[in-house]
């Protein structure tokens, strides 16, 4: 293990699906044959040039990749006006919010539905919190003509009506989940219950880099297009790699997608930003690494928000996409090895960053990357002006305008 | 010989199938649940599965989920569940108790601490839904070292290629989940259950219990003709929930109703081969 850490951070998971002690395959026996089958098919697809060609085709012509690398000039100037002399890093955005459906989620959905087709599966299920992954899944299902069932917490169905209607337009069936506390984790439980009941024909498109092996690796690989593109684009724009890269983390799929290609570039500082909700010292936050401890849920061992008796706590964040009591297992490992630093931003800090981005850049960011932006501005202030900070703008904020209006006390 | 092995050996000489009721510990409250637990053997329970509540029971249908929520709301924890077993053992040294649940509450307590406490309390076996053979080093092997049986679920998706791996570290008995699905779901066809029981018995030399979807005395009787044990959970909990709804203040009525239902199911199982 020590050797592995010295040589590379990019070789995980091991054959048991572990990143250090994290990850694994903690599922009911009914699902074991299915995830073993998925692993086998995924390994075969990875080395199949035809699969890669097909994936590239849809990423380019359907999703709209590559997404641009953008120099946020006015935001940089804004930071430099407040920074000490010679300070204020150059801020770049990786603009995955310009993807079809408005977020990075589609990268993974295209990959997984191509796998589902390859495996001859005829029915797709997914879980969703805010509805972004649900919309992305419903979108690829419509494109490939497969029936789609999306599990969504009953409260989220109520507060994310535009996305619910979007999914319906795309032909998906939405199942409001009232079991447990009716949130994203319960939606995932119900999706797993559906899967154990419909094992023969159903493919479960998990939306984040979590769940039983091989999902964390598979989702990471499909999202790594973000970091791979960013690396090449940064070389072209600046002739070198960035000094700092940052992304927000709920389950952590956009973050691992950006981070993974940079993990062995030791000069690149990597920072993940969790949602601190009302504050990590309150019981209303979603910062699993900062405020949780290792446990087992949804098929993997990872950091979880839980009580002393191992009962899972409810997460809270103004951003529904970060509102999950766990985190992808690879992040737990990167946290413990120290390769990636994890910090957090509160609801209020994210809201301020959201407004600043609208005003300075003419970009309405999703509330999720607004968390990363809040910490990125602090970080850029401390950095020298010849340094570069890259932030993953993983989603656009159209979906959030009602939430933001509500938080700001405005009428829409 | 372990309590589980002793019990199955004794049933074999009587040519009877075992009846195994499932109860959620702490549902609807600690005292009623303990009272019910103590009454189960006289109502016909040969072994008892005691549910350990968890916030996210992903293999369970609505009935057992809600039972777990009632237990959690009444303050039930894994420690309190072990306490219940200790209390039960004061009056019953023979009826095996199997804890059934999910890994995280055990992991949070610490595997070593949990196993020491479980041995002390008189727990005989564990069914941990989210620990497949691939994760045997977590709890299965340490539990067996302490003399606690680790009972594995075999399912309709467990094919011949996988079966040996599922059986390998299993002890006590094998639990056949008769439907691919969640607890309380539809029943499997009788013929496929009989085939599966024959297949599992041949592969393991262990007794085979059948559960998931057994709801009525008729179905229990049918399964008991081939299986070594019949597990009923959701049907008992439905009885508990229904009685509780009608008599929120009278917990004696609740325990009485579940005991009566247990008696009917046990009788069906015990007379299945007459």
Image: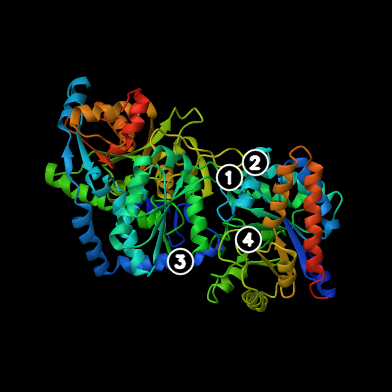
Q: Is residue A68 left or right of residue A126?
A: left
Which quarter shows the N terminus of chain A?
bottom left
Dot 2, crowdedness within 10 Å: few (<14), some or many (≥20)? many
Residue A366, given in percent of the width and then of the height, sits at 30, 37
Which quarter shows the C terminus of chain A?
top left
**Residue B243 visible (yes or no):** yes
Label 1 close to label 2 by CB (< 8 Å): yes
On screen, residue A240 above or below A37: above
Q: Kindly state the secondary structure of the residue where label 2 is placed.
A: helix
The chain carrying label 3 is A
Residue B187, given in percent of the width and then of the height, sits at 62, 66
Q: Are marks 1 and 2 on the same chain?
A: yes
The chain carrying label 1 is B
On screen, residue A211 above or below A288: below
Between discs 4 and 1, the one toward the N terminus: 1
Of A32 and A18, which appears nearest the observer?
A32
CA gap, disc 1 and disc 2: 8 Å
> Measuring 21% from the left and 50% from the top, which residue is drawn there?
A229
Which residue is under mark 3?
Answer: A36
Q: Is residue A252 left or right of residue B113?
A: left
CA gap, disc 3 and disc 4: 22 Å
Q: Are marks 3 and 4 on the same chain?
A: no
Which residue is under mark 4?
Answer: B141
Which residue is under mark 2?
Answer: B72
Residue A408, given in percent of the width and then of the height, sits at 34, 24
Which residue is under mark 1?
Answer: B55
Q: Is residue A86 left or right of residue B238?
A: left
């Amino acid at each position: 293990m020590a050797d592995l850490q010295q040589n590379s951070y990019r070789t995980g998971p091991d054959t048991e699906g572990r990143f250090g002690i994290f990850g694994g395959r903690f599922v009911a026996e009914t699902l074991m044959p299915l995830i073993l089958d998925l692993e086998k098919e995924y390994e075969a697809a990875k080395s199949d040039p035809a699969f890669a060609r097909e994936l590239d085709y849809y990423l380019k012509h359907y999703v709209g990749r590559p997404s641009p690398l953008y120099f946020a000039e006015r935001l940089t100037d804004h930071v430099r006006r407040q920074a000490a002399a010679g300070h204020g890093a150059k801020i770049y955005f990786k603009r995955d919010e310009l993807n079809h459906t408005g977020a990075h989620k589609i990268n993974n959905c295209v990959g997984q539905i191509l796998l589902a087709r390859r495996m001859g599966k005829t029915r797709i299920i997914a879980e969703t919190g805010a509805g972004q992954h649900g919309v992305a899944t419903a979108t690829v299902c419509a494109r490939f003509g497969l029936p789609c069932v999306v599990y969504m917490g009953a409260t989220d169905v109520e507060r994310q009506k535009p996305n619910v209607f979007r999914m319906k337009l795309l032909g998906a069936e939405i199942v409001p989940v009232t079991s447990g506390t009716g949130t994203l984790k319960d939606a995932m439980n119900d999706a797993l219950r559906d899967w154990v009941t419909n094992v023969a024909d159903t493919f479960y498109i998990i939306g984040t880099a979590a769940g039983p092996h091989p999902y964390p690796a598979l989702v990471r690989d499909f999202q790594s297009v973000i970091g791979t593109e960013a690396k090449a684009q940064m070389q072209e724009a600046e002739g070198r790699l960035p000094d700092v890269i940052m992304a927000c983390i709920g389950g952590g799929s956009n973050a691992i997608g950006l981070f993974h290609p940079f993990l062995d570039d030791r000069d690149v500082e990597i920072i993940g930003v969790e949602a601190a909700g009302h504050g990590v010292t309150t019981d209303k936050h979603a910062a699993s690494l900062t405020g949780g401890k290792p446990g087992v849920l949804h098929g993997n061992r990872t950091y979880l928000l839980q009580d002393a008796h191992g009962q899972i706590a409810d997460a809270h964040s103004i951003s529904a996409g970060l509102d999950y009591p766990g985190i992808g297992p690879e992040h737990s490992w990167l946290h413990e090895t120290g390769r990636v630093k994890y910090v957090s931003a509160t609801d209020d800090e994210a809201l301020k960053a959201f407004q600043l981005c609208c005003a300075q850049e003419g970009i309405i960011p999703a509330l999720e990357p607004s968390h990363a932006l809040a910490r990125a501005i602090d970080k850029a202030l401390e950095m020298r002006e010849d340094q570069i900070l890259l932030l993953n703008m993983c989603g656009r904020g159209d979906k959030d305008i009602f939430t933001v209006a509500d938080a700001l006390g405005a009428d829409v | 010989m372990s309590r589980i092995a002793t019990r199955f050996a004794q049933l074999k000489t009587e040519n009877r199938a075992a009846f195994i009721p499932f109860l959620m510990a702490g549902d609807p409250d600690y005292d009623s649940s303990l009272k019910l637990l103590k009454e189960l053997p006289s109502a016909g329970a040969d072994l008892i599965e005691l549910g350990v509540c968890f916030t996210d029971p992903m293999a369970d249908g609505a009935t057992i989920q809600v039972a777990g929520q009632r237990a959690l709301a009444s303050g039930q924890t894994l420690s309190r569940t072990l306490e219940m077993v200790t209390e039960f053992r004061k009056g019953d040294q023979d009826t095996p108790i199997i804890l059934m649940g999910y890994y995280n509450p055990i992991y949070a307590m610490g595997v070593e601490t949990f196993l020491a406490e479980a041995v002390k309390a008189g727990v005989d076996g564990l069914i941990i839904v989210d620990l497949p053979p691939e994760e045997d080093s977590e709890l299965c092997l340490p539990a067996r070292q302490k003399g606690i049986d680790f009972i594995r679920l075999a399912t309709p998706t467990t094919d011949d290629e996988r079966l040996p791996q599922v059986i390998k570290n299993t002890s006590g008995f094998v639990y056949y989940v008769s439907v691919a699905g969640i607890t309380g779901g539809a029943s499997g066809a009788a013929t496929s259950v009989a085939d599966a029981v024959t297949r599992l018995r041949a592969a393991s030399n262990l007794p085979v219990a059948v559960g998931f979807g057994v709801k009525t005395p008729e179905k229990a009787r049918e399964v008991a003709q081939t299986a070594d044990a019949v597990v009923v959970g959701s049907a008992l909990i439905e009885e508990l929930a229904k009685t509780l709804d009608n008599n929120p203040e009278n917990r004696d009525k609740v325990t009485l109703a579940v005991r009566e239902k247990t008696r009917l199911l046990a009788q069906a199982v015990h007379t299945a081969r007459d």
